Image: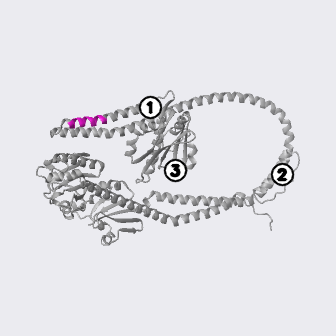
Amino acid sequence: MSNRKVKISLAVKLSLIIMLTSLLGVSAVAYLAISQAKEVFKQKNDSAIQRSLQKYEKNTQDSLKKLKQDVLMLANNNSVKGFIRAFRNRFNYDEVENKTIDIYKKELKELFKIVLKQNKNYFQVRLIDPVSGEELVRVDRKYGKILVVPDSKLQNKLSRDYTQMAIKKRGEFYISKIDLNREFGKIEFPIKPTLRVAKLTSNDLKNSGIIVINVDVSELLEFNKQRRNKIIKTYIANKEGYYLLNTKEPNKEFGFEFHKDYLIYDDFEQFKDFYNSDEVALNIDMQNSILKAKKIFITPKRFIVIAKHTTESLFGKSEQNYFAKLLFFIVLTVIVIFIITVVVARKFTHPIIKLTKVANEIAESRGSKKVCIDVESNDEIGELSSSIKVMLDTLLKSKRELEEFASRLEIEVEKKTHELKVVNEGLQKKVDEKLAELRKKDQVLLQQNKMATIGETIGAIAHQWRQPLNSLALNIQMLVDMAEDKQCSVEEMEEFVDKNMKTIQFMSQTIDDFRNFFREDREASRFDVKEAIEATLALQTNQLKNNHIDLDTNLISIEILGYRSKFMQVVLNLISNAKDAILEKRERDVSFEGKINIVMKKNTDGFVDIEFEDNGKEIPKEIEKKIFEPYFTTKELNKGTGMGLYMASEIIANMDGELMLKNDERKVFIIRLRIK
């Protein structure tokens, strides 16, 4: 029988151990991921929808409360009460305030205009005579303009339910059902979902009037905001079950106005019992989707139902949380695998350690003596031990040959040294040429960065001008209408000219801001930091507003010595980066509300800190130290040069300051400048 040992490769041994350990680790991670994923998704989806319903209910109740307060304010207004006294007087004269009805009518028109200007979801304010039902004063919002309705176009509203119910309730608020607004008995187009709130100014019917405010329900109940959310489908129905909002099938909205029976409980059977019960909330957890609903009471007896429906797979945040947990356990498994591998490998590397000691002895003796090698192993290490023995014998023989060869080698070294010197001189020349090319590229990138800043600023100016130009167009149209109706007096013409000159002056100021923004600072000068920041924000305000980004500032007036226009470019760069981070985060969550805060703090050591904070996409810890390096960018191709923050830090450094990033619980860029 043969005594020869079976040879097992060291690589095979380690590979088998690593494969078995990895299999155990990955299996554990996969099992944990599968068992937790479904529960995580459901919890996140359920929580998100629940918060959304609670927030919607609060906003709706707050809006209704404010609506009632506005109606009550008008009902108790002295001009309204004086008008009624003058209206009831046969001479149309108020003896209490010594005013005529025409004076009061003018005051009421201005008062109603102010109410409409301050509340964009109101589109009509009226004062109605409860005896005759005639409209006495009425101001409308149409096509973005606030118009006083001429006396010749006022209507009789005695038969309307809000007139009769306001009289019947005698001093209490009456809130109408939600329907489509009608003019002269016909539905107004474009359609306008309407809620009306009416109230008598006093309990004495003969000495009272009815205040009525018409509200655009699409604004009051945030229809447009609900439609923008493509992840969660929203449904709103009235007490009878008819759809007021259906983000999945808009054609079913207000079907009762067109004799169509589109009912929410025809699409969702679960709502039949919900409508007939005293429950105010409905939670339905289906296999692949979640449906939640809530009753929101408009009056003690009338309510609307808001329902939100979504599938689990559509929640990006839930998926991110899921993968974060999965990644954590994978990393943990890898660490365990690493520890096990190290412990096991130490056992197999013991023979190698012995060989290392032998090799050190050979090195110390410079191969001039024999060394005992007693390493025995049935793998490659054993073969290595045998090879070292042969190598040591060969080394002793070769040493003598090397000594003879050394003398010849010195001559060759001198020759090669000369050749290497020539090569180095050529390399130096090529290095200089490449450096020159890189400098040219730097200039091109700096110019691109400057052009990007100019483009950002021009875009901001376009947003700044759009609203004034629209206002000019509307004002000119209003002037034409007034001229056609022959209602244009000298005073109105002067008011029109004054209003539009202010608009033109605003646009002219925008041009001056743009010119000052890119004026080259050849020498350092004193300037107010607060004024420079506000001048930069003036170019950005409308752009941030159009992107639904809230801007909050807390600035103090401090003068420093530096370069004003370059400092403004730094502020523009930080605001633009914050806006981009918010928009990138909103791509994953369309309901995300962006915020930017700018705060100035004066330190006791003679410095002022300017903090720029936003709640946009976070900056990973691993790239914090790279963001101020040239050419480094996290933006997509052709969307960034990587020079913005680098140039910003250079500008602040030239002003004896520092640009820093604080990225712990909050993401804050800080400009620190010395107060001189």
Name the element at disc 3. Answer: loop
- Packing grade of label 2 (10 A; few <14, some 14-19, many >=20) is some
Q: Is residue 579 magenta?
A: no
Disc number placed over residue 666 in the picture, else none: 3
Q: What is the three-letter code of the residue carrying label 2?
A: Lys
* Alpha carbon distance from label 1 to label 3: 32 Å
Residue at the disc numbered 1: 518
- Packing grade of label 3 (10 A; few <14, some 14-19, many >=20) is few
Q: What is the three-letter code of the residue carrying label 3?
A: Arg
Span highlighted in magenta in the image: 491-503
Residue at the disc numbered 2: 389
- As drawn, is 145 to the left or to the right of 384? left
Q: Residue at x 71, y 28 (%)?
A: 421
Q: Locate the N terminus and report the quarter of the image it occupies.
A: bottom right
Q: Residue furthest left?
A: 90
Label 2 close to label 1 by CB (< 8 Å): no
Q: Earlier in the sequence, mark 2 or mark 1?
A: 2
Label 2 or label 1, whichever lies nearer to me, is 1
